[in-house]
Amino acid sequence: MLLHPNLEETHTMEQIRAMITGIQGYVPEYRLTNQELETLVDTNDEWILSRTGIKERRILKGENQGTSVMGAEAVKGLLQKTGTNPLDIDLIICATVTPDMPFPATANIISDLVGSKNSFSFDLGAACSGFLFALQMGAQFIQTGTHKKVVVVGADKMSSIVDYQDRTTCILFGDGAGAVLLEPTQEEFGIMDAILKSDGAGAPYLHMKAGGSRKPASPETIAAREHFAYQEGSTVFKFAVTNMADVSAEVMERNGLKGDDIAWLVPHQANKRIIDATANRMGVGPDKVMMNIERYGNTTAATIPLCLWEYENQLKKGDNLILAAFGGGFTWGSIYLKWAYDPK
Ligand code: UT7
């Protein structure tokens, strides 16, 4: 949520907003195609494409290659293209469900890899809504005036928690990372409003059974394949369609926006059918919907920044963007932002 309406009135004169001043993505080289998945599980290209819209995903291969490797690549590229000195970064937040290890935070490891010696850093877990939650949290540090340069990373190595014997999940997910730089502005650009939600009653439908404090790793949990993502797909599908569209409609309505006012819808890339249904309910045409699910699948916290990165050259200063996501938790949300710069 943005400021309470009453607070907003008293702060109007000097309100600081957080704007995205740069975006960078990173995907690993290896392409896991539908054809290769056909050799692993009982599935076929036609089913995967028609039910999900996915043709291939990227996979991070190699020993000791965690999520931080991809996150750091994205942040290094971001710093380079925005001409930012790593020593000037105040904060790094990394949204992920696949941290390198339970602790320390992957954001700390990224911070070390990019040389941001003066920042503090931490991880945020909100599954597929992680980037939106982290973006709004990063924005708060800017809006209060306490921090000037905040890096928000969405990164996941889903291949580390996907069961390549389970055809209902292994076809969906891929690896990737994206990062944005947030800086303050007193102009009418940047993050304008956000509605973020969560409901722990959704946990049974999308979770990882073992490896946490409730059920630590043991030979039994490994034998039962409980260290992989478990999903009841059709239940999650129904909640995703309804909640993503409802929350996006609410954010549009309370900012006086109609479908025609939206330059781009940036939806979490979980399933092309969910994206199409959400756009439809918002009255946004398919030519205004960012989509790269065909090439990357569902990269969890990375889908939205990867979309922004790939469409960056088509974004113009002042464009109204609606970012929307739904994921494990359940978590969901929508952010309205006014893009702050023209293509460079
Ligand atoms: O990002 C986090 C949030 N996650 C999501 O938003 C994902 C939401 N869920 C989905 O995207 C979809 O539910 C799936 C893509 C996971 C599944 O699609 P569906 O249309 O809901 O299929 P279903 O689960 O209802 O299964 C339909 C049939 C079943 O066979 P029967 O029982 O009708 O004989 C499945 O066994 O399709 C079968 N099936 C497959 N067939 C070929 C399931 N997976 C596959 C597969 N290849 N990979």
Image (tube, grey):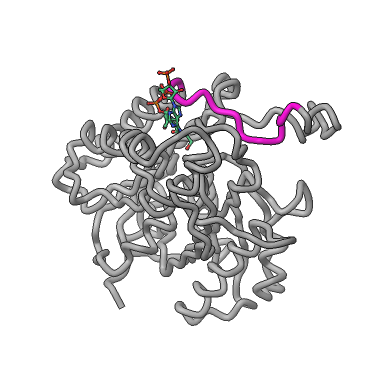
Instruction: Give 60 or 151, whichever is nearer the viewer.
Output: 60
Q: Tell me the quarter of the image containing the C terminus.
A: bottom left
Instruction: Give 201 or 230, whichever is nearer the viewer.
Output: 230
At horizontal 53% and vertical 61% (from top left) the residue drawn is 30
Is residue 63 rendered to the left or right of residue 175? right
Q: List x then y, in percent, for residue 250.
A: 31, 32
Q: List x then y, in percent, for residue 334.
A: 38, 40
Is residue 272 rendered to the left or right of residue 141? left
**Location of residue 316 (image quadrant):** bottom left
- Residue 230 lies in magenta, yes or no? yes
Q: Is residue 65 above or below residue 54?
A: below
Instruction: Give 147 or 304, whichever is nearer the viewer.
Output: 304
Magenta stretch in the rendered image: 224-235
- Residue at the far left: name it: 260
- Residue at the far front: name it: 39
**Location of residue 2 (image quadrant):** top left
Is residue 121 rendered to the left or right of residue 189? right
Residue 176 in sight: yes
Q: List x then y, in percent, for residue 241.
A: 35, 28
At horizontal 78% and vertical 54% (from top left) the residue drawn is 104
At horizontal 37% and vertical 37% (from top left) the residue drawn is 52
Residue 6 in sight: no
Q: Is residue 316 above or below residue 225?
A: below
At horizontal 36% and vertical 34% (from top left) the residue drawn is 47
Ligand 1, what quadrant? top left
Q: List x then y, in percent, for residue 188.
A: 30, 59
- Residue 139 lies in magenta, yes or no? no
Total labels drawn: 0
- Residue at the far right: name it: 219
